Image (tube, coloured by chain):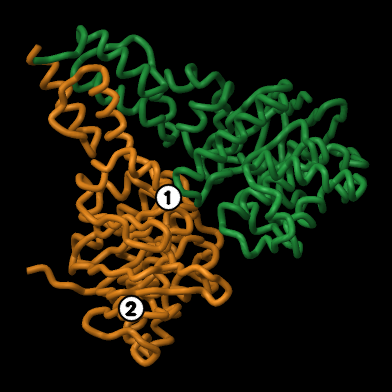
Chain colours: A green, B orange
Amino acid sequence: MDISLSNVEYRYQAGTPFERLAIQDVTIDIPSGTYLALIGHTGSGKSTVLQHLNALLQPTLGSVKIGDREVKANEKNKNLRAIRQRVGIVFQFPEHQLFEETVEKDIIFGPMNFGVSENAAKERARVALKQVGLGEEILEKSPFDLSGGQMRRIAIAGVLAMNPDVIVLDEPTAGLDPRGRKEIMDMFYNLHKERNLSTILVTHSMEDAARYADQIVIMQQGRVAKRGTPEEIFSAPEDLVQMGLDVPEVVRFQLKLEEKTGLNLGKIYLSIDELTAAVTKRLGGGVRT
Amino acid sequence: MKKSVVSLKDVSFQYDSEEQYALKSVTFDVYEGEWLAIVGHNGSGKSTTAKLLNGLQFPSEGEISVCGLQLNEETVWDVRKRLGMVFQNPDNQFVGTTVQDDVAFGLENMGIPREEMVERVQDALKKVKMDQFLYQEPHHLSGGQKQRVAIAGVLALRPSIIILDEATSMLDPRGREEVLETVRTLKNEKSLTVISITHDLDEAAKADRIIVMNRGEVYREGTPEEIFSMDEELVKLGLDIPFSVKMSKAFRQQGFQLSKHFLTEEELVTELWTSHSRM
């Protein structure tokens, strides 16, 4: 499902003394199947953009096209539920939203709310549980007796059980240990490929943006500051630094190495293996005796 | 001779509802003026350890002493004056409606006279560079600023030990650096002892000493060099190795002969540069 934002502006509490302009003139195309990383500082407007992707917020100017629906400013937009079913958002610390007595009830709540029968929803719960790497024995447990990492997976399963076409992830690995972080990111990447989803990842991790995304959008002060492939974005590291953003560790290392040695590798490398291979080649085999 | 300021002896702990022990005969010391990082997978017992040190929970077995005081229900208030804690979520630790009220809260609890309180609040906020925000509402601050205010709240009590319980894990990279830099400066100026419970291995690489926890037990203890030479063993424990160590390994695989695994990028770059210029 394609999503596109056209000249979107959003003002919080518009028309009141507390009015605050959060984003303006935001145009982003997300063709079906894209893995897009949205990066920027806290307060740059990322979360506001995110909430437009399933019409939780409706633009105060411009329009958002989600599949065949268009949500426009200053129009009554009815029946947005269908949109929300197709675009699943995994919010930050989604485990804080668990509330049911059992894991199964928690996962089937979403689909049943959208009119799926109980049996079909339970079947979906089993599939979703498998996708997040948990066993069925957990279904009858209280979500509150599980570990933090398991709770996070249950909450994600609840979103997957809606069978969304688009999945939006807001810092999905915050607070997890390094293994948990890698497992969750790999899981979303596999789902993205297997189910041919569109994935939108809001992250502070330049490593994740470089590793998983095909497109990166950088937000700054409520506007789109830059857009491109990871190679394009990270090949101009000085722009990122100027915006006060980090570059991936590998890029930072390459820049330090080039500065110190005067070596110029000619292009930016985004993985450790590519970089070490390129340096070795340049230094003539690298073996020193 | 290193002076021990915190000591755990055979400490075990079990949460009421759980069959398994969250901590199993944990023994270690924390020395005056050091930066100790405690790392481990989710559920390894790191945060339970922090709760026990601050008397939020008491051990099922074993003993804890802080600055020579044996920790129990009678001494817990004295212990908390010596050992302050900053928690993970910046939004869950505010009680005051303004920044200065928030920092004053702990002092009010201790019955500090008003004049002294005013002075201590300003002093603490100055140290974390938040003295321009006295009348701000805490929820209007950035994550990094909030955590610095939380640190000021702890500092105002003039503790000798500060525990960071994943205090930077919810912050963006800039906020994280703000907080760590603040604590580093304070540690150097005041010989504060820092216990940092963290998943951030690049932060742990800068500690004086690291304790690795695994399934409720102390798995290994050592300097960052010693711990990170464990290499793939750390990955098996659910952890990772710092970037510069990964980079050192990759260069070795390419045939570079490096003198060691480097813990900072600068050292590695220097080594590569010297080896290059000698070729």
Circle 1: is it few (<14), some (14-19), or many (20+) Cα within 10 Å? many
Residue A53 vs residue B110: left or right?
Answer: right
- The amino acid on which the numbered mark 1 sits, given as a three-letter code, is Gly
What residue does disc 2 label? B157
Can you give x and y, in whole percent of width and height, for residue B254 in the image?
26, 17
| Image point (88%, 38%), residue name | A82
Label 1 to label 2, Cα distance in Å? 24 Å
Residue B97 in sight here? yes
In this rendering, the answer to whether A230 lies above or below A245 is above
- The amino acid on which the numbered mark 2 sits, given as a three-letter code, is Leu
What residue does disc 1 label? B175
| Image point (88%, 49%), residue name | A112
Sequence-earlier tag: 1 or 2 = 2
Q: How many marks?
A: 2
In the image, B28 versus A113, the foreground residue is B28
Q: Secondary structure at mark 2?
A: loop
Circle 2: is it few (<14), some (14-19), or many (20+) Cα within 10 Å? many
In the image, B180 versus A98, the foreground residue is A98
Can you give x and y, in whole percent of width and height, for residue B69 in the image?
26, 85
| Image point (39%, 72%), residue name | B153
